[in-house]
């Protein structure tokens, strides 16, 4: 096989299906894909007979359109008798490098069901809500087309105030399996970044590099999805670590394929 033929083969393998939000026929195809993905991975909650999508589902929809959330700020607006945080998230279109949406959100331990939440969890939930709100502002109709309610589940107030169950608040996790090398990087980085309200989150450039690496054909779809679901929680240091780990995984797998050939 000539070098030109090899280059063409690599280009074909590297092509990853994505959608353009400006084309309604493409986004309707995305709605079908989204409905299947959300159902298979249980990324929704049934509240009073209606199904609401977790923020991870909204992030998946955004990532398929090349639109990623970038945290602008998480501000402590607490008082002596209340833990309260405000977050703002911008949506960045990786194709145009333009901000195409934004969302603000607040979380307080005086809300129903959050009396016993720790401070880092209040800050984390404010950020999570802001992500969902930002995506909702531009993608609500796609979620509706997929058969779900156009409100992120994190905005719904449906939990009781039970300290035994909410002592350590959580964000909903996708029940997906991924290969150890990439999955471990995603889980480790997310867990550490969630602990510190004042963390410096990964830059848009770092997120773009992670997505570029995830688009390599040796990375499986499950691995890509796992990392994308956690990408917004990465701080700058751990995003750099994730990039290094991805590069090593890609190098090892490509070397393995070459040896097999």
Image (tube, rainbow, N blue to C red):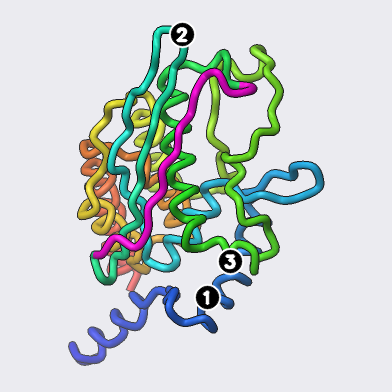
Indicate which disc residue 82 carries. Answer: none
Q: Residue at x 43, y 78 (%)?
A: 22
Q: Residues within 10 Å of mark 1 (few under 14, many from 20)?
A: many
Q: How many labels, in total?
A: 3
Label 2 belongs to which residue? 81
Whichever of labels 3 and 1 marks the residue nearer the N terminus, that label is: 1
Q: Residue at x 45, y 61 (%)?
A: 62
Of 55 and 5, nearer the camera is 55
User: Over which residues does the magenta segment extend?
Assistant: 98-113
The residue positioned farthest toward the top in the image shown: 80
Residue 121 is situated, as x and y percent measured from the top left of the image, at 46, 24
In which quadrant will I find the N terminus? bottom left
Label 1 belongs to which residue? 27
- The image shows residue 54, relative to residue 200, as above or below, that is below
Q: Is residue 109 left or right of residue 145?
A: left
Q: Residues within 10 Å of mark 3 (few under 14, many from 20)?
A: some
Q: CA distance from mark 2 to mark 3?
A: 39 Å
Residue 51 is situated, as x and y percent measured from the top left of the image, at 72, 51
Q: Are marks 2 and 3 in contact (CB under 8 Å)?
A: no
- The image shows residue 55, relative to residue 100, as above or below, that is above
Of 248 and 124, nearer the camera is 124
**Membership of 175 in magenta stretch:** no
Q: CA distance from mark 2 to mark 1?
A: 46 Å
Whichever of labels 2 and 3 marks the residue nearer the N terminus, that label is: 2
Q: Quadrant location of residue 45?
A: top right
Residue 99 is situated, as x and y percent measured from the top left of the image, at 29, 60
Label 3 belongs to which residue? 141
- Residue 57 appears in the figure: yes
Q: Residue at x 39, y 42 (%)?
A: 186
Q: Residue at x 53, y 47 (%)?
A: 55
**Membership of 104 in magenta stretch:** yes
């Amino acid at each position: 096989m000539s070098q030109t033929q090899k280059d063409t083969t690599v280009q074909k393998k590297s092509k990853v299906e994505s959608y353009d939000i400006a084309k309604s026929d493409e986004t309707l195809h995305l709605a079908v894909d989204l409905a299947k993905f959300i159902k298979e991975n249980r990324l929704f909650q049934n509240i009073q007979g209606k199904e609401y999508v977790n923020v991870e589902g909204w992030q998946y929809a955004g990532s398929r359109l090349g639109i990623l959330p970038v945290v602008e700020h998480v501000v402590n607006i607490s008082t002596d008798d209340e833990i309260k945080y405000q977050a703002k998230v911008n949506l960045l279109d990786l194709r145009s490098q333009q901000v195409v949406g934004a969302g603000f959100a607040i979380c307080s331990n005086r809300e129903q069901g959050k009396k016993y939440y720790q401070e880092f969890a209040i800050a984390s939930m404010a950020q999570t809500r802001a992500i969902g709100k930002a995506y909702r502002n531009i993608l609500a109709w796609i979620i509706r087309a997929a058969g779900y309610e156009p409100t992120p589940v994190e905005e719904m107030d449906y939990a009781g105030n039970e300290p035994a169950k909410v002592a350590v608040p959580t964000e909903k996790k996708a029940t997906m399996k991924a290969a150890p090398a990439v999955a471990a990087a995603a889980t480790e980085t997310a867990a550490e970044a969630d602990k510190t309200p004042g963390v410096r989150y990964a830059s848009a450039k770092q997120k773009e590099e992670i997505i570029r690496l995830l688009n390599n054909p040796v990375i499986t779809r499950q691995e890509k999805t796992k990392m994308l679901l956690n990408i917004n929680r990465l701080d700058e240091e751990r995003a750099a670590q994730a990039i290094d780990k991805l590069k090593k995984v890609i190098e090892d797998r490509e070397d393995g394929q070459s040896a097999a050939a």
